[in-house]
């Protein structure tokens, strides 16, 4: 049984991009020795000026985890900052993480450019991948289910592990990323689904919201009139038909290519499949929303269990580095 670890930043409610990008694999791996974290320290690296309390989002993400079907009896769900060893391990790994590696990190450079209106020129944000390496290595995780955007961070984790093992002694295995079939999901505007673009469909969206968002979704931009032939391959709506395994997907493509169907009806058909897909998630979400006390308890127990593993590894790493 492989040790599995992954995490999600509690910057808001989770959306279909999170689900199809990574969360789907959390569920598949929950039967192994799996730890699913809510990375509140990581949220603070970019949200430190925000007025909303990160702790409130932590609960929302925990509910999203549970709504997506994770069973707390099979896997360990916990909050990063409830396990203080993450901070200490990040400090230790920071000693050996070359600045050049961090400054060259493509995700870092991209975010500095992309995220407007926030000052991300901080020590904490530069150290984001060091903290992530600490998260993964504290559990000696072999499998890390993540979205495609996390691959550079995972590569850095492997490099930091190798460097530690080489400088001191072999303590850490090198983790492997586990990707889904659809690691990149288009949002309602056709760009990658992301909270910062405001183009998400959330796990907590009810049927009316889903209908509304799908109705406003972008289609083949070249198809201006109903008589125009469409190109399903570039249409986000079509992508969802395939993703949701609409059995009539061939018909959808054929009718689109030959202008035999309109985008309005096409979207309505897709929304039907999407609502059916989301229905059990939505139902479980409502159920857990009414039991917030139980959610808090699940996190407390998860953190206790995670902590016992983390303490062992931290001790081993500190000994290897010669400060214990
Ligand atoms: N950086 C990840 C993201 O934005 C979240 C994360 C934090 C994570 N620590 C992790 C993912 C450890 C995997 C493993 O999605
Ligand atoms: Fe997209 Fe459907 Fe319109 Fe074709 S008919 S462009 S697949 S929404």
Image (cartoon, rainbow, N blue to C red):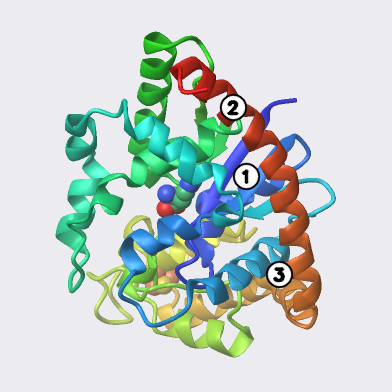
The image quadrant that residue 6 belongs to is top right
Q: Secondary structure at mark 1?
A: helix
The image's mark for residue 315 is 2
Whether residue 35 is visible here, answered yes or no, is yes
The image quadrant that residue 28 belongs to is top right
Horizontal side, residue 269 vs residue 231: left or right: right
Q: Quadrant of the N terminus?
A: top right
Disc 2 packing (10 Å; few <14; some 14–19; many ≥20): some
Q: Gap between marks 3 and 2, in whole Å?
A: 40 Å
Disc 3 packing (10 Å; few <14; some 14–19; many ≥20): many
Contact (CB < 8 A) between labels 3 and 2? no
Q: Circle 1 sits on which residue?
A: 25
Task: Specify which label sits upstream in the sequence, 3 or 1.
Answer: 1
Q: Residue furthest right?
A: 73
Contact (CB < 8 A) between labels 1 and 2? no
Q: Secondary structure at mark 2?
A: helix
Q: Nearer the viewer, residue 60 or 245?
A: 60
Q: Nearer the viewer, residue 219 or 123?
A: 123
Q: Residue furthest front?
A: 324
Identify the residue shown where x is 79% and y is 54%: 72
Can you say whether 205 is above or below 196 in the image?
below
Q: Nearer the viewer, mark 3 or mark 2?
A: 2
Task: Give residue 189's position: percent from left, percent from top.
Answer: 32, 72
Horizontal side, residue 62 vs residue 108: left or right: right
Task: Specify which label sits upstream in the sequence, 1 or 2.
Answer: 1
The image's mark for residue 281 is 3
Q: Nearer the viewer, residue 129 or 88?
A: 88
Task: Give residue 244's position: percent from left, percent from top.
Answer: 60, 60
């Amino acid at each position: 049984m492989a040790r599995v670890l992954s995490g999600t930043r509690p910057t808001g409610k989770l959306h279909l991009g999170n689900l199809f990008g990574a969360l789907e694999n959390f569920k598949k791996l929950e039967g192994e020795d799996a730890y699913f974290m809510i990375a509140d320290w990581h949220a603070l690296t970019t949200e430190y000026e925000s007025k909303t309390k990160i702790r409130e989002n932590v609960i929302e993400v925990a509910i999203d985890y549970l709504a997506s079907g994770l069973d707390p009896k099979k896997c360990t769900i916990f909050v990063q900052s409830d396990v203080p060893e993450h901070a200490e391990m990040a400090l230790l790994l920071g000693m050996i993480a070359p600045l050049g590696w961090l400054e060259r990190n493509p995700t870092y450079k991209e975010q500095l450019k992309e995220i407007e209106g926030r000052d991300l020129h901080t020590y904490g944000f530069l150290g984001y991948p060091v903290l992530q390496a600490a998260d993964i290595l504290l559990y000696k995780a072999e499998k890390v289910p993540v979205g495609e955007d996390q691959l550079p961070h995972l590569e850095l984790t492997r490099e930091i592990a190798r460097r530690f093992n080489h400088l001191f002694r072999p303590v850490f295995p090198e983790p492997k990323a586990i990707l889904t079939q659809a690691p990149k999901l288009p949002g309602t505007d056709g760009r990658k689904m992301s909270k910062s673009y405001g183009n998400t469909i959330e796990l907590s969206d009810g049927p009316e919201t889903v209908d509304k968002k799908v109705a406003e979704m972008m289609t083949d931009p070249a198809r201006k009139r109903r008589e125009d032939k469409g190109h399903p391959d570039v249409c986000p709506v079509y992508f969802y038909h395939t993703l949701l395994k609409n059995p009539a997907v061939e018909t959808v493509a054929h009718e689109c290519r030959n202008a035999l169907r309109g985008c309005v009806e096409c979207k309505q058909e897709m929304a039907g499949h999407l609502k059916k897909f989301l229905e059990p998630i939505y139902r479980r979400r409502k159920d857990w929303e009414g039991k917030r006390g139980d959610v808090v308890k699940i996190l407390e127990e998860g953190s206790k269990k995670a902590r016992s593993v983390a303490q062992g590894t931290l001790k081993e790493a500190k000994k290897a580095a010669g400060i214990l």
